[in-house]
Image: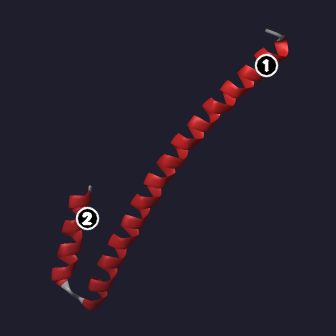
């Protein structure tokens, strides 16, 4: 094979590896995004009952959070 073909194959291989790495990073970021959304929900569930002094809802929200860990 010519040198140009080897260079092309090496470039394609490098690009495939880079794409795989980026896909892995995107999947990890998606997991972080989902977890962050869950935490925001928990904070909202805690703040509203705290403002309303609803002890039962506070305990329920804390229990739900503990179970999600």
What's the coloring here? Answer: secondary structure
What percent of the width, then of the height, locates residue 14?
A: 68, 27
Q: Is residue 21 above or below residue 32?
A: above
Asked which secondary structure carries label 2, the reply is: helix
User: Alpha-carbon neighbours of circle 2 within 10 Å: few (<14), some, or many (≥20)?
Assistant: some
Q: Depth check: give the residue in front, 27 or 5.
A: 5
Ranked by sequence position, the earlier of labels 1 and 2 is: 1
Please name the residue that numbered disc 1 is placed on: 7
Q: Is residue 45 above or below residue 38?
A: below
Could you tell whether 48 is left or right of 53 in the image?
A: right
Could you tell whether 23 is left or right of 8 in the image?
A: left
Residue 65: assigned label = 2
Q: State how far apart marks 1 and 2 are (Cα).
A: 53 Å
Quadrant housing the N terminus:
top right
| Among the 4 quarters of the image, the one containing residue 17 | top right
Q: Residue at x 18, y 74 (%)?
A: 60
Could you tell whether 34 is left or right of 9 in the image?
A: left
Q: Give the number of callouts.
A: 2
Q: Residue at x 26, y 55 (%)?
A: 69
User: Alpha-carbon neighbours of circle 1 within 10 Å: few (<14), some, or many (≥20)?
Assistant: few
Asked which secondary structure carries label 1, the reply is: helix
Q: Residue furthest top?
A: 1
């Amino acid at each position: 094979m010519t040198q140009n073909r080897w260079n092309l194959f090496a470039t394609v291989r490098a690009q495939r590896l880079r794409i795989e790495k980026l896909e892995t990073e995107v999947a990890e970021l998606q997991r972080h995004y989902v977890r962050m959304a869950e935490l925001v929900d928990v904070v909202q569930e805690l703040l509203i009952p705290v403002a309303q002094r609803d002890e039962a809802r506070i305990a329920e929200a804390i229990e739900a959070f503990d179970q999600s860990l």
